[in-house]
Amino acid sequence: MKKYIFILLAASLGLSSCSPFKVRSDYAQTANFSSYKTYKIRIDDLKLNDIDKDRVLNELSKQLQMKGLQSGENPDLIVNVKANHKKITDITTSSPGGMWGWGGGFGWGIGMNRTWSSNYNEGAIIVDMVDARSQKLVWQGIGSGISVDRPKAKQKQIPQIMSEIMANYPPGMKK
């Protein structure tokens, strides 16, 4: 019996930690998400190249439609999408292992630490959903960890992160 519990625990931990992204969301507890049927996407602050912009907007529309929402000119929700990136400096230090010396395992030796640094840009996408009638923010999803400097990685990462962000909408729904 203990063996099966361990296997289930290991499997659930493995499944829950496979994403390279940090995704979180927040929502207004007073919002009635079941009343939202239509949406319109607004991209006032989507500072992406045209290729990435198409990837984000196509995946967002797909995800919204999978949630039962339809695009419309007189929408219940205004969906505002933003993107940004920041420069990350990653510093790694390693210490030498093992023992050095002379004479029966005792003595002295010198070891040197090695330090590497790398700089890269990490991108984030923010999805704000605003109630069209009240003009109040009712839901926000944020995902970060996109490899901005690697075009081939972005091809896969943008649809994946959009899917993970939208997995939290509507709030309270199990995946």
Image (spheres, helix red, strand yellow):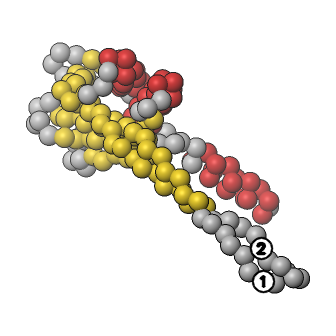
What kind of element bears circle 1?
loop
Q: Is residue 106 above or below residue 119?
A: below
Closer to the N terminus: mark 2 or mark 1?
2
Crowd band around label 2 with a 10 angstrom C-alpha radius: few (<14), some (14–19), many (20+)? few
Q: Splitting the image into 4 quarters, where does residue 99 fall? A: bottom right
133 relative to 171 in the view: left or right:
left
Q: Where does label 1 land, which residue?
A: 107
Which residue occupies 17% across, 15% down? 73
User: x, y (%) of residue 48?
Assistant: 30, 25
Is residue 172 in view from this perspective? no
> Mark 2–mark 1 contact, CB under 8 Å?
yes
Whole-Å distance between the Cαs marked 2 and 1?
A: 8 Å
149 relative to 109 in the view: left or right:
left
User: x, y (%) of residue 55?
Assistant: 39, 20
Is residue 26 in view from this perspective? yes
User: x, y (%) of residue 97?
Assistant: 71, 67
